Amino acid sequence: MTKLLKTLLATACAAGLLVAGAASAAEIKERTLRFAFQNVKEHPQGQGAQKFAELVGEKSGGKIKVRLFPGGTLGGDLQTVSSLQGGTLDLTVLNSGILAAQVPEFAMLDFPYLFNNTAEAHAVIDGEVGQQLHASLENKGLVGLGYWDLGFRNLTNSKRPVTKPEDMQGLKIRVIQSPIYLETFKALGANPVPMPFPEVYTALEQRTVDGQENPYTVILGNKFHEVQKYLSATNHIYNPQSFVIGQKTWKKLSSDEQALIRAAAAEAQTFQREVTAKAQTEALDKLKQEGVAANEIAPEEIDRFRDKVKPVVEQFAKDLDPAMVKAMYEAIEKVRAGQ
């Protein structure tokens, strides 16, 4: 091949790439996506949302903008999901277990004392089980983009330290609007009160409830420690979070735009998980500095908590797809066995 022919072929290939690039760029339209979530923008959830917005802006050349609505300003999680399904809102991230209202099997992820650590949770949500759960949302008007981390949930209250199950007796505890949370806290002897997240601070301040349960970062970020005296490391539920987009919005996107959104979501997921892992320890330290009376719970007492909620797990498991439940436990066992 002559030098001239090589040059001509290289020029033609470059021109072809430029034309393909231009065509691809033409598939990216100017649009703004509305992204609502419950935590404040400084929380790891908010930081993940901001990272996603930045990535989408970069990858679209500034054509696609993501507008953030933090702090539950557009309503609680159930209202937000409904808005995504109706097409009046585009994106949200929420505790995966809340999606049991759409697909019952999501309740598995909220089984109390299911996960011992983050690695076990990731084995489930990043594997076949997590993929199947998100795939099942598509006929519910939602599309799963990935899983974020919220962390282990712990208990705060204004009455007393909780060091054993008996200390839960009679405490009015705000819980998320999910049946498994209601039954879990009933089994522990508390009086659970389901409530949208934006209402929690006021309810704690006015003492209409005694306490609430959330990861350390949520407690700190939403200033619950201002109106709660005691913090007990119950570690009762680990919260994976589903990052979802409304299907009505998704169908309006070109294939190039969809690929761009998925790529940004994958990068944002990695970033958000790293932020969460670091932030949990820092949040606990800060809460202690702010004067919260924090206590650990002895392993033997955690075993007693676990025993009390076993009937709840059995109750909910029997109504779910047994193959899915089995696959979830098998994924966890592989991690525990070091496979």
Image (cartoon, helix red, strand yellow):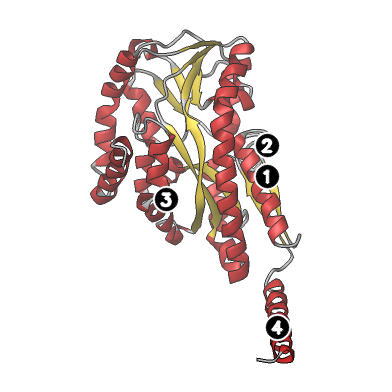
Residue 123 x, y percent position in the rendering: 38, 44
The residue located at (45%, 26%) in the rendering is 193
| Corner quadrant of residue 233 | top left
For label 3, the crowd category at 10 Å Cα-Cα, with few meaning under 14, some 14 to 19 and many 20 or more, is some
Q: Earlier in the sequence, mark 1 or mark 2?
A: 2
Nearest the eye: 314 or 50:
50
Q: Earlier in the sequence, mark 4 or mark 3?
A: 4
Q: Secondary structure at mark 2?
A: loop
Q: Are marks 1 and 2 in contact (CB under 8 Å)?
A: yes
Q: Secondary structure at mark 4?
A: helix
Q: Earlier in the sequence, mark 1 or mark 3?
A: 1
Q: Which residue is mark 1?
A: 50
Mark nearest the camera among 4 and 3 is 4
The three-letter code of the residue at mark 1 reads Gln
* Disc 2/disc 4 C-alpha distance (Å): 48 Å
Residue 21 x, y percent position in the rendering: 70, 75
Mark nearest the camera among 3 and 2 is 2
* Disc 3/disc 2 C-alpha distance (Å): 27 Å
Q: Earlier in the sequence, mark 4 or mark 1?
A: 4
| Quadrant including the C terminus | top left
- Left/right placement of residue 132 relative to residue 71 reads left
Q: Which residue is mark 2?
A: 41
Mark nearest the camera among 1 and 3 is 1
* Disc 1/disc 3 C-alpha distance (Å): 27 Å
Q: Which residue is mark 3?
A: 102
